[in-house]
Amino acid sequence: MKKFTVIGVYTDNGQVFANTEEAENGEQAIQASAAAVAETGADAEIIVAIEGEHFEGDTLTFPGECAVDVRTILEGI
């Protein structure tokens, strides 16, 4: 088993999340993360599974709590 970070977006509020899952491969990590989200009653879209354990503020940097339009990012430069 390996650790994977699964990144997705909650559909009700657009908040981005990163869950750590233990699995044999990325597909299994995505399935595990989807099951964990569904168990809470939430709905989400899964974007990617990345091998390894990644954390916000360490190896992950999000532009905000939700997806941010590129024009908004560029206006801040």
Image (spheres, rainbow, N blue to C red):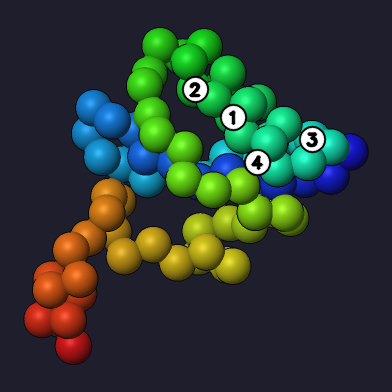
Query: In the rendering, at what x and y percent does residue 73 appear?
Result: 20, 74
Q: Is residue 26 placed above or below 10 in the rendered structure?
A: below
To which quarter of the image does residue 43 belong? top left
Query: According to the image, label 1 marks what residue?
Result: 33
Q: Is residue 50 left or right of residue 22?
A: left
Residue depicted at x 61% and y 34%:
30
Q: Do the residues labelled 2 and 1 touch (CB within 8 Å)?
A: yes
Q: Is residue 35 left or right of residue 52?
A: left
Residue depicted at x 27% and y 54%:
67
Query: According to the image, label 4 marks what residue?
Result: 20
Query: According to the image, label 2 marks what residue?
Result: 37
Q: Which of 40 and 51 is in front in this view?
A: 51
Q: Is residue 46 placed above or below 52 in the rendered structure?
A: above
Query: According to the image, label 3 marks what residue?
Result: 23
Q: How far apart are marks 2 and 1 (CA)?
A: 6 Å
Query: In the rendering, at what x and y percent does residue 64 appear?
Result: 28, 59
Q: Is residue 15 placed above or below 76 in the rendered structure?
A: above
Q: Which of 26 and 37 is in front in this view?
A: 26
Q: Which amino acid does label 1 sit on?
A: Ser
Along the polypeptide, which appears first: circle 4 or circle 1? 4
